[in-house]
Image: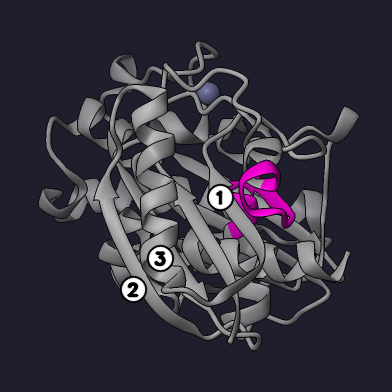
Amino acid sequence: MKIFVGLDIGGTKLLVCAANEKGEVLRRTSRGTPLPLQEGLDALYEMVAEVAAGDEILAFGAAAGGPLDWKNGIVSPLHQPEWQDVPLGRLFKERYDCPLAVEVDTDAAVLAEYQFGGARVSRLLYITMSTGVGGGLLLDGELYRGQGGSHPEVGHLGIAYRCAHAERIECECGAGDCVEAIISGNGIRRIYGKPAQNLDEAEWSEVSYNLGQALRSYSALYAPDLIVLGGGVAVGGGQRLLEPAIRLMQEHCKLVPAPEVRLSDLGYETALYGSVALAMRAKAE
Ligand SMILES: [Zn+2]
């Protein structure tokens, strides 16, 4: 049997899966991410052997934290300090003699929503609200890239926020009051002193307002058909987070059509499904 192999290389967890030629996941495995680089690579090789189970691998797709060089398959994920300029594409090509395509995890996620998540629209924006906030934009199924092939960081947009503890807002990027600093899991913890699931009604209402301001700005800028929200904070917040945010966005979309906004149906493995989509694309190229 011929298979695609997807890798989700996260700062805390490695996920690897094998999928058939239609992209249906057949086998998967996961492990904690080892700190040393070589141990991490060896873990990936072992996991590949486990899910491949002797089948013929057509191509690999990998989702990793940024920054990375997708053209040359080189990754330097910010949350894996020992992974600096790792030539993942070349290492896998040499070892398995087949192509590997790599993208930032949120770009992989938007591909997954398009290909497997029922989000087949012309202009699709995916936003994750988890420990951080990030996203990916697809135009007619192709990733939108920034200057020099860079990955736009939608989590670091500035917005007109409301916050009872504004003095606690601090973005890890150093820029100050970014969306990520205000509505991500880490940001919420810093501002409210507790994880998102323990927020009271007034606190949720602030987070929801601030998400609404972000959605409104994304809509004004991109005028997308659909915005899909994923990540633990968004999925955990559910409708009490989403409904007021969507209402605020709709009220402020005066000149652009308000997009549909919904939660992801792909659960917490969006980036892994995205890595399968990437592998399928790598084979086709
Ligand atoms: Zn920032």
Q: Earlier in the sequence, mark 3 or mark 2?
A: 2
For this rendering, which residue is in front, 186 or 254? 186
Taking the magenta stretch, the answer to whether it contains residue 95 is: yes
Instruction: Look at mark 3 in the image and give the residue it sits on.
Output: 269
Tell me the CA gap for discs 3 and 2: 21 Å
**Tag 3: Cα neighbours inside 10 Å, few (<14), some, or many (≥20)?**
some
Q: Are marks 3 and 2 in contact (CB under 8 Å)?
A: no
Instruction: Look at mark 2 in the image and give the residue it sits on.
Output: 239
Tell me if residue 58 can be seen.
yes
Tell me the CA gap for discs 2 and 1: 28 Å
Relative to residue 55, is residue 133 depicted above or below? Answer: above
Residue 53 in which image quadrant: bottom left
The label number, if any, that marks residue 63 in the structure image: 1
Q: Are marks 3 and 1 in contact (CB under 8 Å)?
A: no
For this rendering, which residue is in front, 34 or 194? 34
Q: Nearer the viewer, mark 3 or mark 2?
A: 3
For the record, the magenta segment spans 93-108
Disc 2 residue type? Gln
Taking the magenta stretch, the answer to whether it contains residue 285 is: no
Q: Are marks 2 and 1 in contact (CB under 8 Å)?
A: no
Q: Position of residue 257 (x, y in %)?
A: 78, 70
SS for callout 2? helix
Q: Earlier in the sequence, mark 2 or mark 1?
A: 1
Q: Nearer the viewer, mark 2 or mark 1?
A: 1
Identify the residue at horizontal 34%, vertical 62% (top origin).
241
Tell me the CA gap for discs 3 and 1: 11 Å
